[in-house]
């Protein structure tokens, strides 16, 4: 079983790889491909649930998707993203919701979009055995305050605040830190300043690891962020397969013979 200690040990030796996944078949592929960490991100709101932002995603949504990912994997560390309003209002409710991600959905750790308000919570979660990943820089749950999804930490003051929060979350016990959409110089400074691994997304090459949304990586997203890179074209492949099915049905080519007949007991190609 993978542990947060394995992830911490890898830092500095080899780059840590993290991808999101939200369902069992994708999670199994991500694990087979040798990725270290699966984040069941609240990005499920945009990728799978059809929302314009991550704000409507609930703890129950994440819980269900974490269960699917955990059932399909054994070797990869599964991190449950705590969605908007599942923490930060009532302390004991936040801790219980995080704990249920491990106790019931079989996550190995949780991630919190972080700020001053998550330092104590990180300490408490860590103290009772809930490994916690921090997340600084662009934190999409704050979109209404930030006024969009622009790069963060671009002024001296903002960069200093991110550095201070990184130190505070390390001291509170966070086992790693996601740095999203910040200048690469800042990501390097933070990575050098703290011992826990940093995992960057749109933060340049100098973090201890990299994370992307799996839909962006495989080429399924319609509007990937500017810092994502596409390594495949699943969208075109899927469309071509579906059009092939439609054309075959409409032209009478499918089903064609015994091979396509369930009565013959043949289940697949
Ligand atoms: O929800 C998510 O996918 C994330 C990553 C972008 C880090 O938080």
Image (spheres, helix red, strand yellow):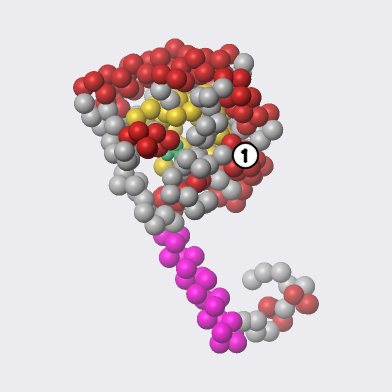
In the image, is residue 243 part of the stretch drawn in magenta?
Answer: yes
Q: Is residue 238 left or right of residue 25?
A: left
Q: Can you name the residue that lies furthest to the bottom here?
A: 251
Q: Is residue 131 above or below residue 266?
A: above
Residue 204 in sight here? no
Q: Quadrant of ligand 1?
A: top left
Quarter of image, res 197: top left
Which quarter of the figure is the N terminus placed in? top right
Q: Is residue 157 above or below residue 100?
A: above
Quarter of image, res 145: top left
Q: Is residue 224 above or below residue 183?
A: below
- Secondary structure under tag 1 reads helix
Magenta range is: 232-253
Q: Which secondary structure is most common in the magenta stretch?
A: helix
In the image, is residue 104 part of the stretch drawn in magenta?
Answer: no
Residue at which label 1 appears: 60
Which quarter of the figure is the C terminus placed in? bottom right
- How far across and how far down the image is residue 186, in percent? 27, 26
x 32%, y 34%: residue: 146
x 52%, y 32%: residue: 85
- How far across and how far down the image is residue 114, in percent? 43, 25
**Number of dots carrying numbers:** 1
Of the pair 11 and 46, the residue shown nearer to us = 46
x 61%, y 48%: residue: 24
Q: Is residue 4 left or right of residue 152?
A: right
Quarter of image, res 258: bottom right
- How far across and how far down the image is residue 108, in percent? 60, 29
Of the pair 128 and 95, the residue shown nearer to us = 95
């Amino acid at each position: 079983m993978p542990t947060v200690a394995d992830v911490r040990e890898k830092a500095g030796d080899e780059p840590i790889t993290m991808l999101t996944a939200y369902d069992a078949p994708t999670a199994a592929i991500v694990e087979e491909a040798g990725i270290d960490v699966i984040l069941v991100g609240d990005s499920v709101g945009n990728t799978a649930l059809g929302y314009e932002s991550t704000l409507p995603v609930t703890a129950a949504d994440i819980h269900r998707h974490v269960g699917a990912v955990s059932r399909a994997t054994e070797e990869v560390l599964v991190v449950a993203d705590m969605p908007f309003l599942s923490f930060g209002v009532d302390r004991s409710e936040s801790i219980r919701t995080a704990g249920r991600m491990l106790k019931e959905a079989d996550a190995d750790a949780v991630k919190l979009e972080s700020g001053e308000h998550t330092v104590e919570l990180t300490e408490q979660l860590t103290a009772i055995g809930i490994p916690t990943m921090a997340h600084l820089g662009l934190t999409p749950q704050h979109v209404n305050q930030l006024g969009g999804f622009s790069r963060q930490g671009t002024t001296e003051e903002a960069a200093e605040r991110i550095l201070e929060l990184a130190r505070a979350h390390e001291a509170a016990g966070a086992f790693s830190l996601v740095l999203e959409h910040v200048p690469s110089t800042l990501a390097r400074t933070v990575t050098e300043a703290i011992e826990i691994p940093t995992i960057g997304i749109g933060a340049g090459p100098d973090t201890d690891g990299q994370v992307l949304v799996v839909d962006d990586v495989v080429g399924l997203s319609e509007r990937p962020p500017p810092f994502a890179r596409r390594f495949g074209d699943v969208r075109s492949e899927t469309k071509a397969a579906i059009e092939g099915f439609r054309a075959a049905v409409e032209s009478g080519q499918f089903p064609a013979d015994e091979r396509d007949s369930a009565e013959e007991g043949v289940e697949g190609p």
